[in-house]
Amino acid sequence: MNRETPPSWVPASGHALRHAGIHFDAVRIEGILGEQAAYEILQFTDFQAGPIVREGTGARNMYFLLPPQTAAAHRWPAGVRALSRNAGGAAFVGVPAMDGDTWPLGWQSLPTDEVPFVDGELLLEMVERAVRAVR
């Protein structure tokens, strides 16, 4: 993975809150459905899915980071929430540094120069697949 040029919105250390809809949109998926969706998209992309942030506490959400102003363009299934400036309010997403102590956040998949964001159409397809798998 290319860690030489992290995006400007990735903090140098620890973690930081970033406003969804500016540098990226996010799709938040809770618990086992989020884990299954991450598994599906990572397998499908040969582990080149784009940025996916995981929470290590609470609901154990997964945040799939999409290009800005794109998440609300899709009809997400129940339990999946688009976080964007067009989603009707301010939403903030915790973003970990590329390495070091970032607990309780971590990268399930890093952003790279080649894949700076998760593809929204592909994510929707993989979420639908994950919904069927966890039923």
Image: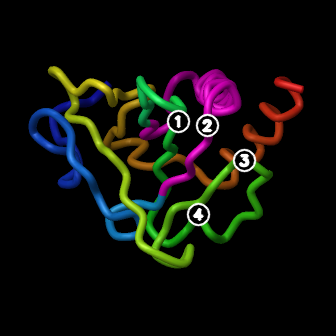
Residue at the spot x=46%, y=39% of the render? 50
Q: Amino acid at mark 2?
A: Glu
67 horizontally vs 10: left or right: right
Membership of 41 in magenta stretch: yes
Kind of element beneath mark 4: helix
Measure how far apart labels 2 and 4 are at the Cα level. Answer: 16 Å
Q: Residues within 10 Å of mark 1 (few under 14, many from 20)?
A: many
Dot 2 or dot 4, earlier in sequence? 2
Measure how far apart labels 4 and 1 are at the Cα level. Answer: 17 Å
Disc tally is: 4
Residue at the spot x=77%, y=44% of the render? 125
Q: Amino acid at mark 4?
A: Ala
Dot 1 or dot 2, earlier in sequence? 2
Q: Residues within 10 Å of mark 2 (few under 14, many from 20)?
A: some
Q: Amino acid at mark 1?
A: Asn
The colour scheme used to paint the residues is rainbow
Q: Are marks 1 and 2 in contact (CB under 8 Å)?
A: yes
- What are the residue bounds of the magenta stretch? 26-52
* Residue 72 at x, y percent in the picture: 62, 69
Residue positioned most to the front: 58
Dot 3 or dot 1, earlier in sequence? 1
Kind of element beneath mark 2: loop
124 horizontally vs 38: left or right: right
Tag 4 residue:
71
Tag 1 residue:
61
**Mark number displayed over residue 30:** 2
Kind of element beneath mark 1: loop
82 horizontally vs 122: left or right: left
